[in-house]
Image: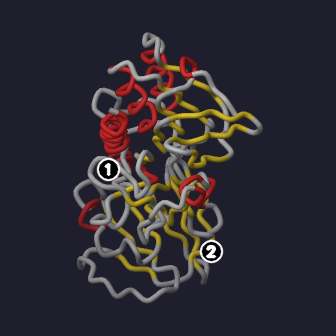
C-alpha cells in the first residue's frame, strides 16, 4: 500500500457529530490536512431539536450539522466524506483507516463515533424517545414544564426529582416492579406496579400499569445504557471505562498514542459516564484536536 504524502491526511476524524465537526474545524484552523468521515448516524437522531446549546437552542440537529459543514468548506486542508469506516488499524508509526476495500493512511486519529442508547424494553418507549421521553433534563426538561413529569425506573429516582421539581407541576416515579431504595421527597408519587406500555396522549404520554391504572404525564425520563456505536475502540485495543466508553485524559488522549477520542464515546475515569451534551462534545472535540496536533508536532 502506498499513498503519496501530498494526498495523505495528517489526521482522520471519524464521526460527523458535534465532537467530530469541532475537531475538524480546530485542525483546519492550523492548516492540518484533515479528513472527516461521517457515517450519517448520530445519537440525537431521535430528537427534532437540540437544546441547552448557546446560540443554537431549539435548532434541529441536521441544521446545526449543515451550518458546521458550510464553515468547514472555507478551509482548503479539509475534506469531508459521507461514508462508513469499516476498520481502523495501527500501521507502523501511523494508522490505516479502511472504507471497504479502500485504505487511507494517517498519522493521527480522532474518534468521535458516539454511542447508542440502550432503552428500557417497555413497549412504546423507543417510539417516543427523543420527544416526550428523554434521558437528560437539561436537554428536554423545559419542554415538560407545567405538567406532571414521570421517572421510569429506580435508577433515576434518587437524583432526578430534585432536578425536575422546579419546572414540574408534579412528579411520579414508576419503579416498574423494582424495589425503591432511594429516598424521594414526600410530594413525589411512587407507583410500584409494572409498566406495561407507554402510549402518546396529546402533547404527552399515558403510562399503562398492571392492574389497569393509567397515569398521564407531560414528559417521562428514562435511564439508558450505553454501547459504542462503532467497533474501532475494540479493534485498536483501547482501554475502556466501566461504562463501556473509551478512557481518555483531560486532552482526549486514549491509551494508544496517536488515537484521540471525543464526545459521548469517551470520558475521563473520574466520571461515571460521559457528560452527554452537545456543548461538552464540542469542547471535547476541540481538546482532542489540540492534543493530536501536539502529537504530530
Disc 1 secondary structure class: helix
Q: Are marks 1 and 2 in contact (CB under 8 Å)?
A: no
**129 shown above or below 16:** below
- Of the 4 image quadrants, the one containing the N terminus is top right
Q: Position of residue 244 (x, y in %)?
A: 48, 66
Residue drawn at 46 percent across, 55 percent down: 134
Residue at numbered disc 2: 196
Residue at numbered disc 1: 138
Q: Where is residue 190 in the image (x, y as percent from the top left)?
A: 38, 79
- Choose top left, top right, bottom left or bottom right for residue 159: bottom left
At label 1, counting other C-alpha atoms closer than 10 Å, the crowd grade (few under 14, some 14-19, many 20 or more) is few
At label 2, counting other C-alpha atoms closer than 10 Å, the crowd grade (few under 14, some 14-19, many 20 or more) is some
Q: Position of residue 213 (x, y in %)?
A: 55, 76
How many marks do you count on the picture?
Answer: 2
The single residue placed furthest to the right in the displayed view is: 101
Given residues 119 and 111, the one toward you in this image is 111
Amino acid at each position: 500500500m502506498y499513498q503519496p504524502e501530498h494526498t495523505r491526511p495528517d489526521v482522520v476524524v471519524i464521526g460527523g457529530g458535534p465532537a467530530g465537526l469541532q475537531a475538524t474545524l480546530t485542525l483546519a484552523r492550523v492548516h492540518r490536512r484533515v479528513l472527516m468521515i461521517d457515517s450519517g448516524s448520530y445519537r440525537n437522531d431521535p430528537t427534532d431539536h437540540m437544546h441547552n446549546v448557546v446560540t443554537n437552542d431549539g435548532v434541529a440537529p441536521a441544521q446545526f450539522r449543515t451550518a458546521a459543514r458550510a464553515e468547514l468548506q472555507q478551509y482548503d486542508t479539509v475534506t469531508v466524506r459521507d461514508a462508513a469506516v469499516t476498520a481502523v488499524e495501527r500501521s507502523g508509526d501511523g494508522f490505516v483507516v479502511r472504507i471497504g476495500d479502500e485504505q487511507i493512511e494517517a498519522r493521527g486519529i480522532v474518534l468521535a463515533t458516539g454511542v447508542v442508547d440502550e432503552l428500557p424494553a417497555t413497549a412504546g418507549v423507543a417510539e417516543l424517545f427523543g420527544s416526550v421521553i428523554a434521558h437528560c433534563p437539561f436537554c428536554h426538561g423545559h419542554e415538560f414544564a407545567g405538567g406532571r413529569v414521570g421517572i421510569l425506573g429506580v435508577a433515576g429516582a434518587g437524583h432526578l426529582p430534585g432536578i425536575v421539581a422546579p419546572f414540574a407541576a408534579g412528579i411520579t416515579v414508576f419503579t416498574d416492579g423494582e424495589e425503591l431504595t432511594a429516598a424521594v421527597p414526600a410530594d413525589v408519587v411512587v407507583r410500584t406496579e409494572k409498566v406495561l406500555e407507554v402510549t402518546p396522549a396529546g402533547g404527552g404520554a399515558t403510562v399503562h400499569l398492571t392492574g389497569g391504572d393509567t397515569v398521564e404525564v407531560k414528559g417521562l425520563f428514562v435511564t439508558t445504557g450505553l454501547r459504542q456505536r462503532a467497533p474501532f475502540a475494540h479493534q485498536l485495543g483501547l482501554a475502556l471505562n466501566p461504562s463501556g466508553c473509551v478512557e481518555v485524559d483531560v486532552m482526549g488522549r486514549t491509551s494508544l498514542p496517536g488515537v484521540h477520542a471525543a464526545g459521548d464515546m469517551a470520558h475521563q475515569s473520574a466520571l461515571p459516564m460521559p457528560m452527554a451534551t452537545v456543548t461538552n462534545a464540542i469542547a471535547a472535540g476541540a481538546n482532542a484536536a489540540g492534543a493530536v496536533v501536539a502529537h504530530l508536532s
